[in-house]
Image: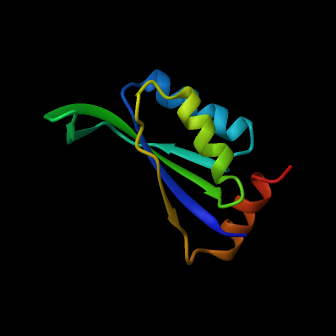
């Protein structure tokens, strides 16, 4: 098992909740944390933009990443959502075992 932490940002609570619920219900993620709003500053289509967003911390596995990415893209309101996956190299073994169990059929 190769655990991953996947990051994305949503523009509002409704889209954040919908994505989180779908990923967990479909067993693509074991857990999704919705963090308090953050202010993002970024360049988009040649202009510097600023937006208030809700970050999601998604815990999953490399096996599920392709389907998880497709599901986020399908549900996300942005034309180009941020989706970044980071490997989890160490963690509490019992937690990592739980993560694997919750994302298995």
Q: Quadrant of the N terminus?
A: bottom right
Q: So how many labels did they put on this image?
A: 0
Query: Where does the image place residue 22, in percent across and percent down from the top left?
Result: 65, 32
On screen, residue 88 above or below 83: below
Q: Which residue: 74% across, 44% down?
A: 27
Q: Which residue: 75% across, 52% down?
A: 103
On screen, residue 86 above or below 32: below
Q: Which residue: 67% across, 68% down?
A: 96
Q: Which residue: 63% across, 44% down?
A: 68
Query: Where does the image place residue 16, in percent across and percent down from the top left?
Result: 48, 31
Instruction: Depth check: give the residue in front, 77 or 23.
Output: 77
Q: Residue lying farthest right?
A: 105
Query: Where does the image place residue 38, in percent across and percent down from the top left?
Result: 27, 40
Looking at the image, can residue 29 be seen?
A: no
Query: Where does the image place residue 79, in percent across and percent down from the top left?
Result: 41, 28
Q: Residue lying farthest left?
A: 48
On screen, residue 10 above or below 64: above
């Amino acid at each position: 098992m190769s655990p991953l932490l996947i990051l994305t940002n949503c523009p509002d609570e409704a889209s954040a909740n919908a994505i989180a619920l779908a990923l967990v219900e479909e067993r693509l993620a074991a857990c999704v944390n919705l963090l308090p709003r953050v202010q993002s500053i970024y360049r988009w289509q040649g202009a510097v933009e600023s937006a208030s967003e809700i970050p999601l911390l998604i815990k999953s596995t490399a096996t599920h990443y392709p389907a998880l990415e497709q599901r986020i893209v399908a549900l996300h309101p942005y034309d180009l959502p941020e989706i970044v996956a980071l490997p989890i190299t160490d963690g509490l073994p019992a937690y990592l075992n739980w993560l694997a169990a919750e994302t298995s059929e």
